[in-house]
């Protein structure tokens, strides 16, 4: 099952807001157990890609405290947005930064009382940023408008400073830096230009230094979308890893890096 982040969903969308994402994911598992047509087991394995990867990591972090009734057997985060400060600094004023920045500024200003949209976004970008924040980059109807608005920014960054002020502090607080007490897999495409490989290289090193066991899979030649495409070489190994978690097979302790799909 997956959380409902459709445009008509009620409430504030917790975009890259860890606790909110985790609660949404865990509540979706609880809700599914009340559907009489379904017969579900006691365990769950969490998958997530991009923002969903960030949500998956936070679900692993918060799961025991928020939903001890949901037995998480493993967490797989694929190209997770593990450090949004670093991601936004690397993007600067490129097209991805132009889209991600307004989404972040909107969500954080709605969710956190000490963050305002106007403080997070440069004055000359605010009008365009508000328009971008109301569009979906995955909706074909919105894509032409998004492309035009992005060009109108002329390559200038949307955000004042991803690392500065209350906004930067809240971004750092929502980095998934807690311990995950179940087997953890992180997969990253080597040609990803949305969540850059160095972001998760750094994240894995930091978490391993903090004592977290991690299986880190790199997928050569795969970009941000390709790594989860139907023909991705990640698919087979990921299903095998997931079956192992449901079967209760242990994951090797420590940190291990592996190339997937390399010939």
Image (cartoon, rainbow, N blue to C red):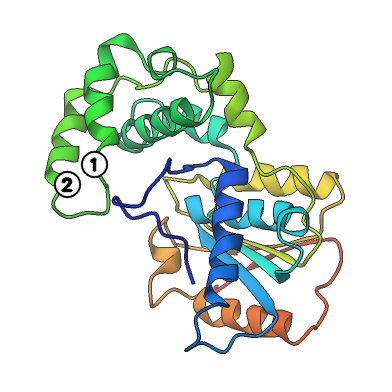
Q: Is residue 22 visible?
A: yes
Write down the residue under mark 1: 135
Residue 241 image-quadrant placement:
bottom right
The residues tagged by marks 1 and 2 sit, at their Cα atoms, a distance apart of 6 Å
Q: 225 and 5: which one is in front?
A: 5
Question: Local crowd at mark 1 within 10 Å, few (<14), some, or many (≥20)?
Answer: some
Image spot of residue 224 (x, y percent): 42, 55
Indicate which disc residue 1 carries. Answer: none
Q: 158 and 221: which one is in front?
A: 158
Residue beneath the point at 24% across and 41% down: 135
Indicate which disc residue 142 carries. Answer: 2
Residue beneath the point at 53% across and 61% down: 48
Residue 211 higher or lower than 256, as above or below: above
Image spot of residue 134 (x, y percent): 25, 37
Image spot of residue 255 (x, y percent): 80, 59
| Mark 1–mark 2 CB contact (< 8 Å) | yes
């Amino acid at each position: 099952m997956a959380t409902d982040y459709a445009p008509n969903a009620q409430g504030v969308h917790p975009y890259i807001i860890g606790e909110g994402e985790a609660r949404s994911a865990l509540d979706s598992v609880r809700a599914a157990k009340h559907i009489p047509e379904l017969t579900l087991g006691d365990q769950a394995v969490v998958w997530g890609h991009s923002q969903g990867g960030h949500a998956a990591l936070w679900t692993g972090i918060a799961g025991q405290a928020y939903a001890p009734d949901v037995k998480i057997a493993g967490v797989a985060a694929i190209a997770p947005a593990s450090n949004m400060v670093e991601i936004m600094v690397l993007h600067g004023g490129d097209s991805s930064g132009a889209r991600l920045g307004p989404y972040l500024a909107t969500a954080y200003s709605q969710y956190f009382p000490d963050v305002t949209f106007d403080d997070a976004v440069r004055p000359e970008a605010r009008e365009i940023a508000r328009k971008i924040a109301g569009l979906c980059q995955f909706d074909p109807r919105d894509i032409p408008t998004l492309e035009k608005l992005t060009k109108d920014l002329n390559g200038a960054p949307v955000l004042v400073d991803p690392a500065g002020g209350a906004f930067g502090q809240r971004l750092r607080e929502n980095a998934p830096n807690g311990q995950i007490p179940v087997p953890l897999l992180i997969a990253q495409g080597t040609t990803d230009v949305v969540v850059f490989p160095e972001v998760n290289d750094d994240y894995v090193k930091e978490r391993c230094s903090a004592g977290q066991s991690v299986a880190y899979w790199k997928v050569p030649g795969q970009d941000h979308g390709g790594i989860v495409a139907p023909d991705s070489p990640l698919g087979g190994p990921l299903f095998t890893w997931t079956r192992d978690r449901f079967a209760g097979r242990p994951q090797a302790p420590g940190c291990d890096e592996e190339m997937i799909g390399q010939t």
